[in-house]
Amino acid sequence: MRAFSLPLLLTLAWRNLWRHSGRTFAILFALALGVWSMVSIAALVRGSLEQQLTKAIENLTGHIQIHAPGYRDDPAIEHRMPPPGPALRAALARPEVTAWAGRVRVPAVVASERESAGVTLVGIEPARERGLSFIAKAVTAGRYLESADEPGLLLGRKLAERLETELGRRVVVMSQGVDNDIADRGFRVVGVFDTTPEATETNFVFVGRATAQRMLQLGDGISEIALMTPERNRLEPMLSELESVAPGLDVQPWTRLEPMLVLTETVTDTILIIWYTIVFVAMSFGLVNTLLMAVFERTREFGLFQALGMPPRHILGQVLMESLILLLVALAGGNLMAWATIAGLEGGIDLSAFAQGLEMVGVSPVIYPAFAVSDAAAANSLVFVLGLAASLYPAWRAARYVPVEAITRV
C-alpha cells in the first residue's frame, strides 16, 4: 500500500463505520467491555494473589532464609547455628538487604492454668522485626515486645481464647534445652496479636531472643536468619553471595520455602490466559460478524471501486483500516473504564459477607486491586494483534470480488 493512499483509506474507513452508527456503537461497546473485563479482573486476581504473597512473606518467611543443615527437615534445637560471622554480617549489611534478623525458633508447649497447646516458640529481636515480619503491626491488645531481653510474651488472639487466658496473666512455656532436658519458664502475657491466617495465631508465641536463649541454654546460638530485599523476584545475586560467605549453611529463597505460593502464582497466570482467550473469542465473533455484514452490504461499491481502478490491496486495506479504528477506539474506551474501576475500588472489595472463612486459608476477605502493566499490555496486545488477524477474512472476501460480478450482484 502506497503511503499517499493512507489518508484516503482512513477517510473512507471512518465514513463507512458511521453509516450504521447503531451497529458501530454496539460493537465498540462489546469490544470495550471485553477489554475492561480483561484488565479489571486481572487487577482483582493479581491483587488477591499479591496479598497472599505479601502475607506469607511477612509471616516469618522473608525473601531469603538461612538455616543450619537439616533444620528445615527437623526444626529441633540440635540443628542450631552460631550467630553470623564478619563475612556474613558484611553481606547482610549491603544495601540490597532492607531488613534482617536472627531468630530462635523451636517446638514448644505453652500452658495456662486451664489448658495447654503445642506451639512454635520464636525468640526475636523486636527492633529488627519491624519491616521484616507482621509481628509489630499485628499487636491489637497490650504492647509489642520492647527488647531482646523482654521477660514478657506475645500470644495470638485465638491461642489466648483456647488457653482461656488474657492480657496480664501468666503462662508457662516448655521446650527441649540443649542438654535434652525440659526447659521451662513462666511468662506474663504483655501483648495479643491478631493476624491472618488464623493458624498463625494458634501456632506461634513470641518472646525476646535473649530470653529464649537463656531459657534453652543456647548461649548466642540461633535457629535461623531471615532477610528482606527490595525485589522478591530478583534474588539470584544475593543468594549467590550468601552461599559464598556461608558455605556450610542452608540458604533458601522464599520460592523454595513456600512452594504452594509459587504454584498458586503459576495457576493464576494460567487462569488469566484462559480468561483472556475466552473473552477474545467472544469479541472476535462480534468483530468478524460486523465486518462481514459491512462487506456484504457494500459488494457493489467494492466492485465499482475496482472498476474505477482501485487495486484489490486497497480494498483489503480499507476493511482492515475499519477494523483498526474499531480496535483502537475500543481499547481506549476499555482501558479508561478499567482505570476508573480500579481507581474506584482503591479502598478494596469486602467479600467477608459472601465468603466466610477466607482468613483460614490465608486469603484476605478484602481484595485490593493491583494493576500490573504486564497484564494490561498482554490484554491489549492480544486484542489488537488477534483482532486484526480475525479481520483478515472479511477483508480478503472484500478484495477478491470480480468487478463485473460485484456491480451486477443484486
Image (cartoon, rainbow, N blue to C red):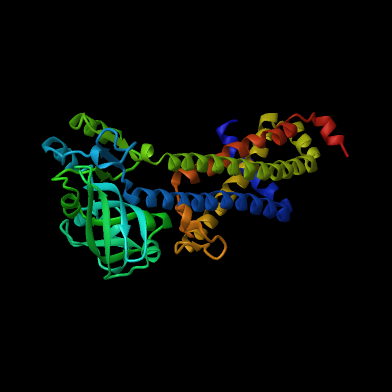
Picture residue at 57% right of the left edge, 46% below the top? 328
Q: Compared with residue 270, is residue 186 higher up or lower down, i.e. above or below?
A: below
Residues 400 and 168: in front is 168
Q: Quadrant of residue 384?
A: top right
Residue 250 visible in this rendered orientation of the protein: yes
Residues 355 and 212: in front is 212
Q: Compared with residue 192, is residue 266 higher up or lower down, i.e. above or below?
A: above
Decide if residue 107 is on the left or right side of residue 273: left
Picture residue at 20% right of the left edge, 32% below the top? 246
Which residue sits furthest left?
A: 86
Picture residue at 57% right of the left edge, 52% below the top? 36
Picture residue at 39% right of the left edge, 66% below the top? 161
Percent of width and height locating residue 4: 57, 35
Which residue sits furthest front?
A: 181
Decide if residue 378 is on the left or right side of residue 118: right
Percent of width and height locating residue 61: 33, 46
Counting every numbered tag in the picture gives 0
Q: Quadrant of the N terminus?
A: top right
Percent of width and height locating residue 160: 36, 64
Q: Quadrant of the C terminus?
A: top right
Percent of width and height locating residue 19: 73, 51
